[in-house]
Image (cartoon, helix red, strand yellow):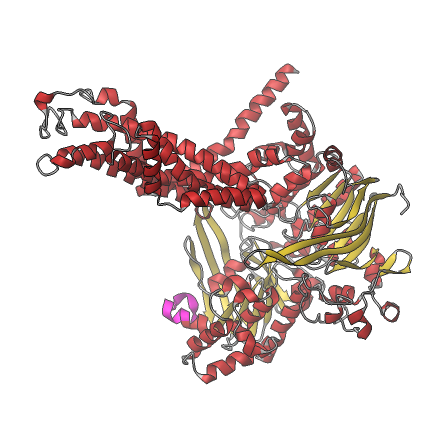
């Protein structure tokens, strides 16, 4: 009897995953058909690998100053040259990827999480709940996002943590609106009505039926926004409102090289190129994911 | 009314108005009277068909009985218990006894859930069975609606319309309810599939001694499935009776128009040639008097002023028409 | 009888992730002048694909790979896109299931009808002649007060009214053929009866030809004169409606007719065993053979050709070879 129960559970486990695998195969097929998505994926994968293995790739300590070697042009010794404190720019760009990833991941989790929850509750309950939550969202949306992020960062004091909080507070509204729209659509579907006919509680309906449907548009939007998050973080860093020196944050590094741009172009250029490539990679990947999840293309 | 053991559900002067908001301040300007004073009794083990065109309120009645929408007025009594003022716990208990199968099997099943989870959901809500017990129950139930064990681990989109409707039926019967609302269960299906679902529903009714409220606009299906028929027009019941009464002696002019309008798949069938007049009026602003008088060939002055009530013709045959005595033969 | 449209061996496929969907597998039938023809079949039988193929409206990932569609002496599949556009504007009209989707939501309906006339007849859209025709056709499709009707936007119309407008747009150019793809499936039964009557009346008044695509055998029985029965991308049977309902020959036709409840059906409804095949991997030979009670060896090997068994009664089944 015990054996039987176990084998049934095992079968349930294996069989439940088969359709998921089929789904992945289909996604992989669509992925292979789009060159730009593939390029985007490679860029982002490379970016992640570089971030993980930064200590092994970077030849120098990113914050170690060596004033005897300041402002050296790119050479075989210092691939991207050195800055005004003699720090190796190549190592700083490599380590900068870690900062960027940290920002992206934390901002996505915080803003995606808050946004989805707010949106789902607003959309599902409607009425007063919806009015209150959405008017708060509108208040956030009324300001240009960079200005708002600057205001938050300035008010809380410049630091990496505060940058992350500031950007999250700006971007959750996007996901809230998306999740609300999806929740509004889903809550009127017959399968939700069937759920209510069974006597399921609102809690159960929201978390096990409405929420899963709202997550995929939010996820697509999150990947599409990752480029913007980097740009915003770099912008804050550039203005001195983000990560503080000597943290190798790309935006701050571009800012560092401002005064030397004419004669020592490499200080600003290489972190700038890094920002451009990663933002482009995220945008290509985001577009690709949106297309792959488009139900019209999936059948 | 006298509580009768034969009666499963009793609906008393049920009303459901939906507010229509308009203007800048979204004030409630008017109400759509989806159901406007309906009395109905559903007996144990019968199939009662509710017939009418879209917007006549037939679906709203089904949903109000299941308490999916709160009635504006009136009451629904299920097995002697009044649903309209039941507590949350009582309602939960009553819900086990009644279920619904929706019209469109493409939207009534959650697209991201496996069949085993869709069909097992009522058990998860209402029982404390272990996951393995639920799996066994799901398997049994799927087999009773003509599906196989391997179908448990698939998503709804992998099934045809007929198979999806079987899944929806399985979900409805897994708790062994007494009463099921069938909301146009076959109108989204092909004819050869429709026949099999109808046969399945009839078999299950026998096997589990179910009671059906069959909501449809297809009179041929009504004739095949129903014991009694209620014809609705703009929120009111206009004719009610045993199936044979309705089909051999249709009395309300609307019933006759409806019967004439349904295309019969038999080129040799001779039937009355009545071409329906006009369109269904706006339910937010129904005509005064008899609601059908704007489209009725028998309309007289009285019809425009006085609203007719359901009158007994004979036996269980009722009609709401001022001129039924002239029409009834 | 004079043939207006002759479809021969039409093959249309769709390229999808799962493989090639063989939607039409050599469809052949004729439409005569002044015909009122029904094309009937279940979901996926190819009835809509047939009409879209005739109109050359098959889009990527679909493709017409073989066959000919001879209309009034010309093969439509060989025309240039420009010539085909003229055929669509003037000679063949089409009415769709969802009338509101086919109307432009931001243009007044009078303007939309006027546009159809002006492109078909090369007249200025502002000319009096065009607008007289607009009012005339609105009156003809039973819409009271055509002048104010022409000033309305599509969202102000009910489903029945919108379908009347579509019929007006379809017939105002006096086409030689009207194709109606499930024209009443989205409408209520009483409105359905009105619309079908209207189509039938106008088509016979204008001496033109109509092809009604439907899944409803009742509509065929009540309104059509001849019927083409399709199954899984093939024509199963063709004949006049009374003959088909009285003496169906193809086992599928027989099963289909018995599966529909008629008022007064006694006993259990008969059903056809099995399910509609997947058209990526359709059964070999006759596509109906896995569900057929009379299947023989040859049925799984060879596709039965369509044969005239009696005058005007065609069937594609090895039982009648």
Nearer to me, C5 or B96 = B96
Queried whether the magenta region covers residue B200, the answer comes back as no
Tag count in the figure?
0
Task: Give the extent of the magenta segment.
Answer: C73-85
Residue lying furthest top: A2
Query: Which secondary structure class fits the magenta region best?
Result: helix
Q: Quadrant of residue A285?
A: top left
**x and y, in percent, of residue B243 in the image:** 82, 56
Q: Residue at x 63, y 47 (%)?
A: C291
Is any atom of residue C314 visible in this view?
no
Queried whether the magenta region covers residue C83, the answer comes back as yes
Quadrant of the snapshot with the N terminus of chain A: top right
Nearer to me, C198 or C148 = C148
Q: Is residue C172 above or below residue C269?
A: below
**B55 on left or right of C35:** right
Residue lying furthest bottom: C128
Q: Quadrant of residue C89?
A: bottom left
**C54 on left or right of A37:** right
Is any atom of residue C240 visible in this view?
yes
**x and y, in percent, of residue B247 in the image:** 81, 61
**C134 on left or right of A269:** right
**x and y, in percent, of residue B9 in the image:** 81, 44
**x and y, in percent, of residue C146 in the image:** 57, 78
Nearer to me, C134 or B163 = C134
């Amino acid at each position: 009897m015990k054996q039987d129960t176990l084998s049934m559970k095992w079968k349930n486990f294996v069989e439940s995953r088969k359709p998921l695998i089929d789904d992945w195969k289909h996604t992989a097929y669509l992925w292979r058909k789009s060159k730009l998505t593939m390029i985007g994926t490679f860029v982002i994968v490379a970016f992640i690998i570089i971030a993980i293995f930064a200590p092994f790739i970077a030849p120098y300590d990113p914050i170690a100053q060596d004033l005897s070697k300041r402002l050296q042009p790119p050479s075989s010794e210092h691939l991207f040259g050195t800055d005004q404190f003699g720090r190796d720019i190549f190592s700083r760009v490599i380590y900068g990827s870690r900062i960027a990833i940290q920002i992206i991941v934390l901002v996505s989790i915080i803003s995606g999480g808050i946004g989805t929850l707010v949106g789902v509750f607003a959309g599902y309950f409607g009425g007063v709940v919806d009015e209150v939550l959405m008017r708060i969202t509108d208040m956030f949306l009324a300001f240009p996002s960079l200005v708002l992020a600057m205001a938050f960062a300035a008010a809380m004091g410049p630091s990496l943590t505060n940058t992350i909080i500031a950007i999250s507070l700006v971007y959750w509204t996007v996901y809230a609106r998306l999740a609300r729209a999806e929740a509004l659509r889903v809550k009127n579907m017959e399968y939700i009505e069937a759920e209510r006919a069974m006597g399921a509680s609102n809690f159960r309906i929201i978390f096990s039926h409405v929420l899963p449907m709202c997550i995929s548009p939010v996820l697509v939007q999150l990947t599409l926004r990752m480029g913007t998050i980097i740009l915003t973080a770099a912008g804050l860093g550039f203005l001195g409102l983000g990560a503080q020196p000597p943290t190798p944050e790309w935006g701050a590094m571009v800012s560092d090289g401002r005064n030397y741009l004419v004669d020592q172009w490499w200080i600003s250029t290489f972190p700038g190129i890094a920002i451009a490539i990663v933002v482009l990679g995220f945008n290509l990947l985001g577009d690709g994911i949106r297309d792959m999840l488009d139900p019209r293309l999936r059948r | 009314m006298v509580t009768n053991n034969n009666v499963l559900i009793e609906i008393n002067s049920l009303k459901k108005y939906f507010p229509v908001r308009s203007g800048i301040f979204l004030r409630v300007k008017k109400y759509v009277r989806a159901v406007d004073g309906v009395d109905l009794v559903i007996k144990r083990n019968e199939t009662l068909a509710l017939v009418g065109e879209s917007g006549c309120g037939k679906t709203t009645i089904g949903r109000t009985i299941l308490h999916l929408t709160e009635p504006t007025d009136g009451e629904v009594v299920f097995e002697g218990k009044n649903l309209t003022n039941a507590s949350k716990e009582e309602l939960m208990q009553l819900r086990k006894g009644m279920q619904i199968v929706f019209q469109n099997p493409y939207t009534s099943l959650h697209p991201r859930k496996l069949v085993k989870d869709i069909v097992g959901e009522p058990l998860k809500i209402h029982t404390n069975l272990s996951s393995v017990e639920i799996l066994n129950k799901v398997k049994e139930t799927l087999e009773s609606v003509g599906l196989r064990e391997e179908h448990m681990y698939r998503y709804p989109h992998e099934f045809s319309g007929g198979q999806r409707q079987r899944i929806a039926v399985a979900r409805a019967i897994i708790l062994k309810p007494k009463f099921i609302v069938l909301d146009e269960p076959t109108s989204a299906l092909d004819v050869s599939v429709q026949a099999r679902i109808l046969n399945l529903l009839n078999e299950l009714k026998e096997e589990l001694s179910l009671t059906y409220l069959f909501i449809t606009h297809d009179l041929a299906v009504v004739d095949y499935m129903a014991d009694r028929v209620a014809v609705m027009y703009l929120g009111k019941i206009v004719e009610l009776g045993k199936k044979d009464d309705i089909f051999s002696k249709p009395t309300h002019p609307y019933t006759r128009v409806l019967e004439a309008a349904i295309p019969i798949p038999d080129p040799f069938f001779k039937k009355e040639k009545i071409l329906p007049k006009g369109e269904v009026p706006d339910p937010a602003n129904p005509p005064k008097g008899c609601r059908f008088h704007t489209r009725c060939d028998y309309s007289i002055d009285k019809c425009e002023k006085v609203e007719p009530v359901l009158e007994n013709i004979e036996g269980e045959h009722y009609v709401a028409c001022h001129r039924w005595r002239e029409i009834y033969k | 009888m004079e043939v207006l449209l002759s479809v021969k061996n039409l093959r249309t496929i769709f390229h999808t992730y799962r493989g090639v969907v063989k939607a039409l597998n050599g469809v052949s039938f004729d439409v005569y002048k002044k015909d009122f023809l029904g094309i009937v079949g279940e979901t996926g039988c190819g009835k809509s694909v047939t009409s879209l193929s005739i109109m050359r409206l098959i889009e990527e990932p679909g493709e017409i790979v073989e066959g000919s569609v001879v209309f009034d002496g010309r093969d439509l599949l060989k025309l240039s896109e420009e010539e085909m556009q003229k055929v669509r504007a003037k000679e063949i009209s089409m009415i769709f299931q969802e009338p509101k989707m086919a109307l432009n939501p931001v243009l007044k309906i009078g303007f939309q009808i006027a546009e159809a006339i002006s492109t078909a007849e090369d007249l200025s859209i502002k000319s009096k002649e065009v607008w007289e025709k607009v009012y005339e056709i609105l009156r003809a499709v039973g819409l009271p007060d055509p002048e104010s009707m022409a000033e309305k936007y599509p969202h102000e119309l009910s489903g029945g009214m919108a379908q009347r407008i579509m019929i007006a747009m379809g017939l105002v150019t006096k086409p030689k053929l009207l194709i109606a793809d499930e024209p009443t499936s989205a409408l209520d039964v009483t409105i359905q009866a009105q619309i079908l009557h209207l189509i039938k009346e106008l088509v016979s008044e204008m001496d033109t030809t109509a092809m009604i695509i439907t899944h409803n055998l009742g509509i065929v029985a009540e309104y059509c004169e001849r019927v083409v029965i399709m199954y899984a991308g093939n024509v199963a049977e063709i004949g006049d409606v009374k003959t088909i309902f009285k003496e169906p020959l193809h086992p599928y036709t027989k099963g289909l007719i018995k599966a529909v409840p008629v008022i007064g059906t006694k006993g259990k409804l008969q059903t056809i065993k099995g399910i509609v095949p997947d058209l990526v991997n359709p059964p070999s030979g006759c596509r109906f053979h896995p569900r057929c009670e009379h299947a023989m060896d040859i049925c799984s090997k060879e596709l039965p050709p369509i044969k005239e068994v009696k005058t005007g009664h065609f069937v594609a089944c090895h039982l009648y070879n």
